[in-house]
Image: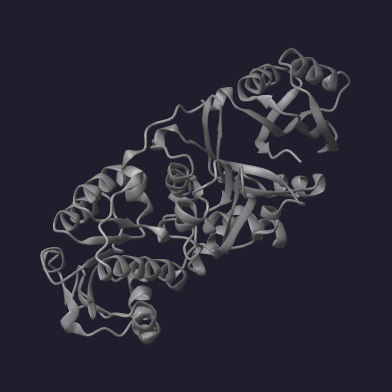
């Protein structure tokens, strides 16, 4: 039976929720023309129905009772844009058990409980749509599921956190120190009042877990992702990187080889010739390598009310099409197994090292011995006088196992001539 009206219930009306309502309202005629049915927002769950809203909304649509959405048999699609994990997990489970399709932008929830929720959806012949969970308005989830489905994905590398990319861009282009760049990001709305999830790399690790699970058809445990943030990246390192022909970015990386998966999030010196080096400010980009398609890059705004709402609304339309054509959904992702993950100590990286040493004969010989003992080969060296008695030394290595590099660092730290090791970063091979 052809459905003339498909009804939507929303959980949340914050920044993203307001954007979703705005897009559905202002583009309603276009959506109806493409879908052949009208989308109607029937109810919106908020914590405080009396709160003034930044978006025009009929007060009769608002409720503070989740059951008004979850248990309403007329509501076909539940859109979760409230955030949070534990409470939200129970609400989404209830929606699926009540036979509703679910659309969500909640990366934290999906990274932790996505596989379990997909199993619930599959058991009830429904689906969870989550395009907006990674990359804001950049289409990523759908291409991985559909357009690139015939490929074996070999690797993915991405700038998937706008806050850290904005900070690093400001440090690089404007010469701002970390704290100044962070304050500016917060003032412009690119960083939360508590930015720790972004700065420490957790936000990017949640997104990587979602992308890697699709790319490699495997459940991804967050604990298996190696994570470092950008808090220790200094302006001095960014300037040295530029001198050496690199830009510093927070990268999320996943790769599969015969031994398993490599999963990591950390700052990386990227060659200025690589497309990711040019991605600036709050923009995101993901670089995929498939065995058939080759290299593909997705680029756009990775956050914000309307870019994220664009992806949420696309998912709503997808779900509505399935309802309109009475398509029952079996969830492929729910059957994913678990592939082995290669520990970070066994992975190979190139390294950037900045240290201060006494300006005296024999220092380089001692460093060369330490690196030689650990089978670490050096690629580039810069030495600059720091003061009358101290030299600042920057070294870039060729590829070496993390364990071997750690062995060399332990030996260097014990040298009397070494005053301090100020920075260690990884380097993308040219």
- Residue located at (76% from left, 29% from top): 398
User: Residue 13, percent across and down?
Assistant: 29, 71
Q: In the rendered image of this protein, does residue 21 appear above or below residue 363?
A: below
- 48 and 258: which one is in front? 258
> As drawn, which residue projects farthest toward the front?
1
> As drawn, which residue projects farthest toward the right?
361
Is residue 93 left or right of 358 when viewed as pictured?
left
> In the rendered image, is residue 232 in sight?
no
- Residue located at (18% from left, 58% from top): 95
Is residue 219 left or right of 154 when viewed as pictured?
left
Is residue 212 left or right of 221 when viewed as pictured?
right
- 190 and 427: which one is in front? 427
Tell me the quarter of the picture where residue 280 sits: bottom right
Viewport quadrant of the C terminus: top right
User: Residue 118, percent across and down?
Assistant: 28, 47
User: Residue 285, percent across and down?
Assistant: 59, 57
> In the rendered image, is residue 157 in sight?
yes
- 37 and 297: which one is in front? 37
Tell me the quarter of the picture where residue 320 sits: bottom left
- Residue located at (55% from left, 58% from top): 182
Q: How is the image coloured?
A: one colour
Viewport quadrant of the N terminus: bottom left
């Amino acid at each position: 039976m052809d459905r003339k009206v498909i009804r939507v219930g929303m959980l949340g009306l914050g920044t993203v929720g307001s954007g979703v309502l705005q897009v559905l309202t202002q583009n309603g005629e276009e959506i109806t023309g493409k879908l052949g049915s009208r989308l109607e927002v029937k109810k919106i769950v908020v914590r405080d129905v009396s709160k003034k809203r930044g978006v025009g909304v009929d007060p009769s649509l608002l409720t503070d009772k989740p059951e008004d959405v979850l248990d309403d048999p007329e509501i076909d699609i539940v859109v979760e844009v409230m955030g949070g994990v534990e409470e939200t997990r129970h609400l989404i489970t209830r929606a699926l058990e009540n036979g509703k399709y679910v659309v969500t932008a909640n990366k934290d929830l999906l990274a932790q409980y996505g596989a379990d929720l997909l199993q619930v959806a599959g058991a009830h012949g429904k689906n969870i749509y989550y395009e907006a969970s990674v990359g804001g308005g950049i289409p990523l989830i759908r291409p991985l599921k559909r357009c690139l489905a015939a490929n074996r994905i070999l690797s993915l590398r991405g700038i998937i956190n706008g806050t850290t990319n904005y900070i690093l861009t400001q440090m690089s282009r404007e010469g701002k120190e970390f704290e100044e760049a962070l304050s500016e990001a917060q003032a412009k709305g690119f960083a939360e009042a508590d930015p720790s999830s972004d700065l420490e790399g957790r936000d990017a690790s949640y997104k990587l877990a979602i992308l890697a699970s699709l790319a490699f058809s495997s459940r991804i445990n967050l604990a298996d992702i190696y994570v470092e943030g950008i808090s220790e990246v200094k302006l001095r390192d960014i300037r040295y990187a530029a001198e050496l022909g690199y830009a510093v970015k927070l990268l999320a990386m996943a790769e599969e080889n015969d031994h398993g998966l490599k999963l990591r999030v950390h700052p990386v010196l990227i060659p200025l010739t690589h497309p990711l080096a040019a991605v600036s400010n709050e923009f995101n980009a993901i670089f995929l390598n498939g065995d058939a398609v080759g290299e593909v890059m997705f680029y756009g705004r990775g956050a914000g009310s309307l870019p994220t709402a664009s992806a949420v609304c696309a998912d709503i339309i997808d779900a509505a099409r399935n309802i309109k054509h009475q398509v029952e959904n079996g969830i492929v992702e729910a059957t994913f197994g678990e592939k082995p993950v290669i520990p970070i100590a066994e992975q190979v990286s190139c390294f950037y090292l900045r240290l201060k040493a006494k300006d005296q004969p024999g220092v380089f010989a001692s460093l060369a011995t330490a690196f030689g003992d650990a089978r670490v080969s050096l690629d580039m060296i810069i030495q600059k006088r720091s003061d009358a008695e101290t030299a600042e030394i920057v070294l870039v290595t060729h590829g070496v196992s993390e364990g071997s590099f750690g062995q060399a660092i332990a030996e260097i730290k014990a040298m009397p001539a070494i005053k301090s090791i100020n920075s260690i970063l990884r380097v993308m091979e040219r």
